[in-house]
Amino acid sequence: MPEIRVDPLSGHKVIVAGERSERPGGEPRCPAPAPIDIAKDPFAAGREDLTPPELYSLREGESVSGGVGDGLSGSTADSAGWSVRVVPNLYPALAADSPTPPADAQPDLFHATAAGGAHEVIINAPESVLSLAELPASRLADAMEVWRLRMRAHSDAAYVQLIVNERREAGASLEHTHSQLYALDFVPGEVARERERCGAYANRTMGRGLLEDLVAEEVRRGERIVAIDEEAVLMAPYGSRLPFQLMLAPRLPRARFEDDGALGSALLHDGLTRLARHFGSSPPLNMWVRTAPRGAEHFCWRIDVAPRLTHLAGLELSTGVNLNIVAPEHAASVLRDG
């Protein structure tokens, strides 16, 4: 029977109605995409002249040093031989020199500020593939280390959001696997609410961590766990808003993704591969790193994976309440056993 669940981290309500996937045409499907036309791929190795000058690159055979990157790559800048490459977004949503809009006569009604900050593109690998799942696990590990490095480079921002959009159905304008980093000069409301819920939970429980306790209880119950390794836990969240949504959380709690410690790259690759295997190809998806915002005393980073197998419709857009037609317990079982 359908039920309304409250996500413990965000407080969002979701209607879980697994029986709706059994109605005609209701089962989530994922048509296989066409391969990338390499001749039109501006992110392919050897086509570095088609992007803005790079901010940072990890060269083949190198490892991330742990610094923040100085914007220089020496004589190898903007040349082939890289494994991960970072460039400014050609069409930035944020910029350090963004002009301040003129003040409106009715600021209580019409208020705008400069879109300050930074907007970068992290090309996850030189291979012309659509999904991180198509890369070797070592490539994803390299990409995640650079995600961390570039987040550190913007440590003065109020909040740094790292996202991945895969396939056009999920908002990717370019097909080649890449990430985007937004350095914001404000803490988004969604993140602020999670910060408040984590703080309130810590106050009620004499300093306990909300995500840490959630992961421990999920592992104890087991019904929504997909996989576990020595670094992280992969699960279908109790309040999943979308079918086959996944969440990766570290085994050892740590506030910020960008701080030293394990990133769970092997388990993330395993989870993305399980999705691709179940659907016959990697589904369109959005993925993001949730790290501790400024001022968070009690927080733990995580990675959310949201496959785009169904469309947001009137209920979601009018109320903010999602209707999930695949119960998280069923999704976890399918991916765990598949």
Image (tube, grey):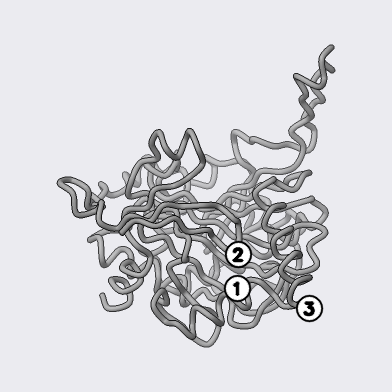
Residues at marks 3 and 1 touching, judged by CB atoms closer than 8 Å: no
Q: CA distance from mark 3 to mark 2?
A: 43 Å
Residues at marks 1 and 2 touching, judged by CB atoms closer than 8 Å: yes
Which residue in the structure is indicated by mark 1? 62
The amino acid type found where label 1 is placed reads Glu
Query: Which of pointers 3 and 2 lies earlier in the amino acid sequence?
Result: 2
Taking 46 as reference, is 295 above or below it? below
Which residue in the structure is indicated by mark 3? 206
Give me the residue at 72% from left, 59% from top: 195
Residues at marks 3 and 2 touching, judged by CB atoms closer than 8 Å: no
Q: Is residue 152 visible?
A: yes
Q: Quadrant of the N terminus?
A: bottom left
Q: Is residue 301 left or right of residue 273?
A: right
Residue 56: x and y in percent read: 66, 56
The circle drawn on residue 70 is: none
Q: Quadrant of residue 59?
A: bottom right
Q: Is residue 260 left or right of residue 19?
A: right
